[in-house]
Image (spheres, grey):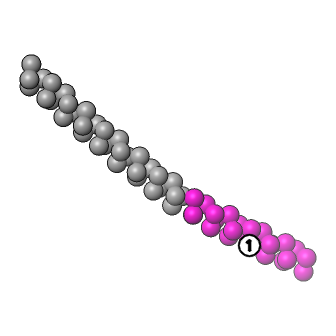
Amino acid sequence: MKQENEIQELKDRLNAVEQQLEVSSKGSKLLRTVFIIILVIFLLFTLIGIIQFVSSG
């Protein structure tokens, strides 16, 4: 009986940890997506600047 209670407690703890990881992974996915978008915009502007510099010279 005691062993079954311990197993149930471990399952509950595991479920709680999995839920916390799921929430944090959603946040990190959003942060990663925003970072990638900013990086792409920066690279695009840099490329446009290089093209304008080369074509004016």
Residue with the most extreme bottom position? 1
Region rendered in magenta: 1-24
Q: Is residue 6 left or right of residue 42?
A: right
Q: Nearer the viewer, residue 8 or 24?
A: 24
Residue for point 12% across, 23% down: 54
Q: Tell me where residue 28 appears, x and y as whole percent.
A: 51, 54
Residue visible at 61% across and 60% down? 21
* 10 magenta-colored: yes
Judge from the rendering whether residue 51 lies leftward or rightward of residue 41; answer left or right: left
Q: Which residue is mark 1?
A: 12
Residue 42: quarter of image: top left
Outermost residue, top side:
57
Q: Could you classify mark 1 by the number of other residues whose Cα lies within 10 Å: few (under 14), some (14-19), or many (20 or more)?
A: few
SS majority, magenta = helix
Residue 43 figure quarter: top left
Q: Residue at x 18, y 34 (%)?
A: 48
Does residue 15 show up magenta in the picture?
A: yes
- Give above or below for 19 relative to 48: below
Q: Is residue 21 left or right of residue 30?
A: right
Picture quadrant where residue 22 is located: bottom right
Residue at x 87% of width, y 74% of height: 3
Whole-percent x, y for residue 5 in the image: 85, 77
Relative placement, left or right, of 3 versus 31 is: right
